[in-house]
Structure formats: structure tokens, C-alpha cells
Amino acid sequence: MSSDAKRALKILMLHGFTQSGPRFHDKTRALEKAIIKAFPSSSLYYPTGPLPLRPADVPGYVPGSQEGGTADCTDSFAWWRRQNGDSPIYNGMDRGLGRIAEAIQQEGPFDGVIGFSQGAAATAIVASLLEPGRKAAFEAAYQEGARKFQYPSSFINGRGQPIQPPLKFAIVYSGFAAPFELYSAFYEPKIKTPVLHFLGSLDTLVDEKRGTVLIDSCEGGEERVVTHPGGHFLPSQKTWLDAAVGFVQNCISKNHKKEDEEDENVEDMDVPF
């Protein structure tokens, strides 16, 4: 791998439902170490979702089990909340995407995004929103007359363009697609950004069926799937770290090759003076 392709990267890390930026950092230190070993001086950024959760919102909560805390205080956050019942609404999605856009504007641009569970769903959404033509796809879907989620204004800069260039890569652990027609413009047309999908064969929270919907929403998705023999977590063994780092290396190398070819094409142009 060339020294150019080993340059420092900036990566946005999106935590899962009931986590926080610092807690997700604690759970991904092995991945962070592997990435920095392959790309020295790289930086990983861990924002926290804007929606605080109560203890009762956390799966497995038992009333009266908190010691030294209150019934309304946890270190658990979300990027959005599913409305009760069968409603096809994610409450707070604008706020969640707004927090991510804020991180991009303050710390970006980012080379890639990595997310877990709800953060993985958000990762795919961010990759989609930053692609050329996605805003037009949202506008076309909205004009069809059906109720649709509109392209978030937080992802548009003062020139009417996305707030940063398209991502070079995305990695989703236990990812899923927003499962309602309301959010179809995130996935139609398919996400073009290279996305690596990690699935846990024993994952009962985000099972293979839910993960496959997101895989099918990405170009070449079925060719970029890694299944580990575990449940709903981010695997930290060397085999799975190598798979993630190898994917990033491949994406960065291809991106540099594309940039070099574009530079050569410009140099070969006839100068009209």
C-alpha cells in the first residue's frame, strides 16, 4: 500500500441506542487501535445522540434496580425514538441528524463513518445524504404526493450543496434500514458509497432479515457482508478487525487511484490558449 494511501483519516463514530459517544469509544478501542496502526495519526470522533433516555427506556431495565441514581437519569442516548405501537414515525430524527451534521461541520470533513445498531442505521443514512443527487431524489419522492421524510436542511450548506463531499467508506455493525415508506428516499436509488456490513449470526435484536434489507439497499451490498458467530455487539477479535481495516484500506486505495486518474485527465486536456 502506498504512503499516500496510508495518510491519516478522520472517521465519525456513531453509537447505538442506549449508548453515548464515550461509552461507544470504550467498546471500540480495539478497532480504533487497529485503524490507527494501519493509518497513523488518524482521528476518530464520537458524538453523542441528542435524545436522553430514561431508565425505563433501556431494554432489560428492572424498576428499583438503580443504585445511587434517579428514575429519570441515565447515561443512555439515542439518535431518534420509535413512536409507540406500529406507527411508521421515528421521533426526533431531525434532531439526531442535526447533531451528526453539527459534528461534520465542526470536525469534518470525514473520510468515513462507522456505526453500531441504531448508529449503523444512521451511518447508512449519512452516507446516502452526502451522495450527489440524493437531495433531488428526496424532492422527487416528495412531489409524488405520498407522505415522505424531507431532505434534512442541516445537511445543506449555504450554497445549497451537501455539507461535505461523499464518504469514501462506511462500516455498519448490526445495521438496519428505516423500515417504512416514509423514509424510502434514503435508499432509492441505492446507496452508492461502499458499505461493509457486519452481521452477528446470534443477533436477536437485529436479525439477518432486518440486516438484509439494508444490504439490498446498497450497491454491491451482497458482496460486502461479514458474518461473525456472535450476537448484538461489535466484534473485537483480530479476524473481524482485519476485515474492517482491510475494507478501509481497499476503499482509500481505490479513491486515491480515482483521484490520480482524474488529475492525469486534466493534465492531458488541450489548453485553449
Image: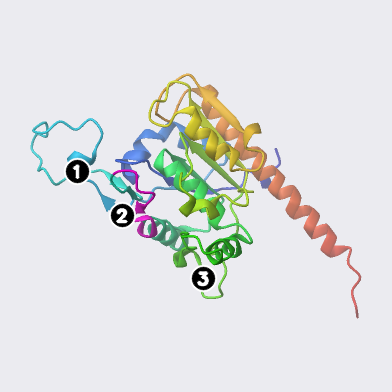
Find numbered disc 2 in the image and state the secondary structure of the residue it sits on. Answer: loop
Magenta span of residues:
85-95
Name the kind of residue labelled 3 in the image.
Answer: Asn
User: In this orientation, does residue 3 appear?
Assistant: no
- Which residue is pictured at 39% across the width and 48% down the height? 46
- Judging by the rendered image, the residue that carries numbered circle 2 is 50
Q: Which labelled disc corresponds to residue 102?
A: none
Q: Is residue 68 magenta?
A: no
Q: Residues within 10 Å of mark 2 (few under 14, many from 20)?
A: some
Q: Return the residue found at the far bottom.
A: 273
Q: Judge by depth and name the residue closer to the eye, 132 or 2.
A: 132
Say which label, 3 or 2, has the lower sequence index: 2
- Judging by the rendered image, the residue that carries numbered circle 1 is 74
- Judging by the rendered image, the residue that carries numbered circle 3 is 157
Q: Is residue 166 left or right of residue 29?
A: right
- Which residue is pictured at 50% across the width and 50% down the height? 125
User: In this orientation, does residue 31 appear?
Assistant: yes
Q: Is residue 59 left or right of residue 123?
A: left
Name the kind of residue labelled 1 in the image.
Answer: Thr
Name the kind of residue labelled 2 in the image.
Answer: Pro
Find numbered disc 1 in the image and state the secondary structure of the residue it sits on. Answer: loop
- Which residue is pictured at 36% across the width and 50% down the height? 79
Find numbered disc 3 in the image and state the secondary structure of the residue it sits on. Answer: loop
- Which residue is pictured at 41% across the width and 61% down the height? 102
Q: Is residue 103 above or below residue 211?
A: below
Q: Is residue 67 above or below residue 272?
A: above
